[in-house]
Amino acid sequence: DPLSVHVDLDGGRDYDILIGRGLVASAGPRIAALGARAAGIVTDTNVAPLYAEALRTSLEGAGLRAGIVTVPPGEASKSYGRFAEVCDGLLALKIERNDVVVALGGGVVGDLAGFAAASLRRGVRFVQVPTSLLAQVDSSVGGKTGINSPLGKNLIGAFHQPRLVLADTASLDTLSEREMRAGYAEVAKYGLIGDEAFFAWCEAHWQGIFSGGPERDEAVAACCRAKAGVVTRDEREDGERALLNLGHTFGHALERITGYDSARLVHGEGVAIGLALAFRFSARLGLCGGQDAGRVANHLALAGLPTRLQQVPGGAGDADSLLDAMAQDKKVRDGALTFILARGIGQSFIAPGIDRAAVKAFLDDEL
Ligand code: NAD
Ligand code: ZN
């Protein structure tokens, strides 16, 4: 039996996240139980040849009409152009108000398909079948959907909660080592935010997550439980949900500086460096001990992730360009930055009003 996490949103919008091996091939009856007659599968050209036919066959076996809309892989597909293509593709498949859009893929496909589902006929049912570790532990849960504008990432979007999330942990067997490690940075993040025991468990069991042992399912479930809790208490990020951005103020700046070029840096690698920086910065401000910062960096490095600015391929630039990149983040007001800092492992908090000079002095030492 799969593991399950219930997301308890008000207004009858609660939904289940199921986690286990083989959920793609058994998705049909579970999706049919939502009451749809047709399903539009949205996926990318990496994932399509691996899992799209198995999903379609399962849906058809459960009595649904099913079609597939495919986009190229990569962040560039979160664009106005691809959004239009996906919407028109779904309309051509005659997806009606009570039918379902199924996102089969990583976070790019989930965000794009989710926004199409939110927009099509003013909102059709949406199911996430995340196939990257990042998507299973983060982007498929919580209802944020959207695309990028030439003016910035994720600036166009909607909150549109899924009706069901099916995280097939066997699908991660085909994910590249690098994408696996990148997703693992987000796994470790949940321990660092609010659960020291989970971080300690990760230190002991991370290899099982990578190799596909039962620890993988347990870790995905633990992360979904943590994210579901945060999202239930603060669906629209008025407060607590911002904690999920631990490591991301620095991480987003590094992604911006490397031009969102995944050959240089993928999101999770930026987050890994950002997590290490957030703890070293916290230690420097006297909030947590240096040994906590050391423990965080050691574990991420052991899992094969970068933890220092010097490890950014092509360089991280100077402190001022990093600060400028951070200042473009939406969490910045009047020259003061909002960071997620930590009083220890599992004791993160929102720290508004951190002044630029303190960050600059820290970055100068780090570079
Ligand atoms: P991604 O979707 O680009 O997937 C990474 C790569 O892995 C792609 O090349 C993809 O084709 C491939 N892939 C996916 N599953 C595979 C599998 N099972 N086997 C082989 N290859 C596979 O990237 P991602 O890291 O999954 O997601 C990143 C995106 O998620 C970003 O756009 C980010 O903004 C978004 N995101 C959204 C939220 C949210 O709350 N909505 C949260 C975090 C991140
Ligand atoms: Zn992230």
Image: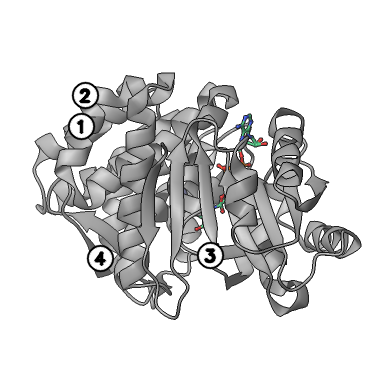
Task: Identify the mark nearer the N-term, 3 or 1.
Answer: 3
Q: Position of 34 compared to 39: left or right? A: left
Measured Cα–Cα span from mark 3 to mark 4: 20 Å
Task: Determine whether 148 is above or below 180 in the image.
Answer: below
Give percent across and percent down for residue 333.
Answer: 39, 76
Q: Which mark is residue 204?
A: 2
Bin the neighbour count of mark 2 within 10 Å (Cα to Cα): few under 14, some 14-19, many 20 and up: few
Q: Is mark 3 within 8 Å of ligand 1?
A: yes
Q: Secondary structure at mark 4?
A: strand
Q: Secondary structure at mark 1?
A: helix
Bin the neighbour count of mark 1 within 10 Å (Cα to Cα): few under 14, some 14-19, many 20 and up: some
Contact check, label 3 and label 4, Cβ < 8 Å: no
Q: Which residue is denoted by mark 1 in the rendering?
A: 201
Bin the neighbour count of mark 4 within 10 Å (Cα to Cα): few under 14, some 14-19, many 20 and up: some
The amino acid sitting under disc 4 is Ile
Measured Cα–Cα span from mark 3 to mark 1: 29 Å
Please identify the residue farthest to the right as the structure is shown: 92
The amino acid sitting under disc 3 is Lys
Task: Identify the mark nearer the N-term, 4 or 2.
Answer: 2
Task: Identify the mark nearer the N-term, 3 or 4.
Answer: 3
